[in-house]
């Protein structure tokens, strides 16, 4: 799911702080969540771990950087 698709689904609402960190991080998180949803029946726990890894690896950024 791209950022544009997400915004369209949210009715054009402003993105939250997490969503606005970086487009690539947001898209990676959404991709991981989509994978987790696809494998929610216990087929593969790796997709859920991927989302946690994104949060661990993505450095915190201060506003305006």
Image: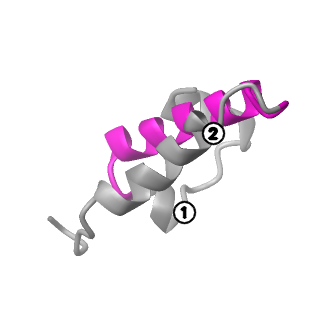
Taking depth in this image into account, of 1 and 28 the one nearest to the observer is 28
Query: Image quadrant for the C terminus?
Result: bottom left
Residue situated furthest left in the rendering? 65
Residue extent of the magenta highlight: 21-41
Among the 4 quarters of the image, the one containing residue 47? top right
Are there few (<14), some (14-19), or many (20+) residues within 10 Å of tag 2?
some
Determine the secondary structure under disc 2.
Answer: helix
Query: Where residue 51 sits in the image (x, y, percent)?
Result: 51, 47
Query: Could you tell which of marks 1 and 2 lies nearer the N-terminus?
Result: 1
**Separation of disc 1 and disc 2 at Cα?**
17 Å
The mark lying in front, picked from 1 and 2, is 2
Determine the secondary structure under disc 1.
Answer: loop
Q: Name the residue rendered at 54%, 63% in the picture.
A: 16
Query: Where residue 46 sits in the image (x, y, percent)?
Result: 56, 36
Residue situated furthest right in the rendering? 41
Residue 44 lies, with reference to residue 56, above or below; the image says: above
Query: Image quadrant for the N terminus?
Result: top right
Q: Which residue is mark 2?
A: 33
Q: Name the residue rendered at 50%, 35% in the picture.
A: 3
Q: Name the residue rendered at 45%, 45% in the picture.
A: 26
Q: Which residue is mark 1?
A: 16
């Amino acid at each position: 799911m791209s950022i544009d698709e997400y915004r369209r689904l949210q009715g054009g609402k402003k993105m939250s702080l997490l969503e606005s960190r970086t487009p690539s991080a947001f898209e990676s998180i959404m991709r991981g969540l989509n994978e987790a949803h696809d494998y929610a029946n216990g087929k593969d726990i790796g997709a859920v771990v991927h989302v946690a890894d994104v949060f661990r690896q993505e450095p915190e950024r201060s506003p305006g950087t």
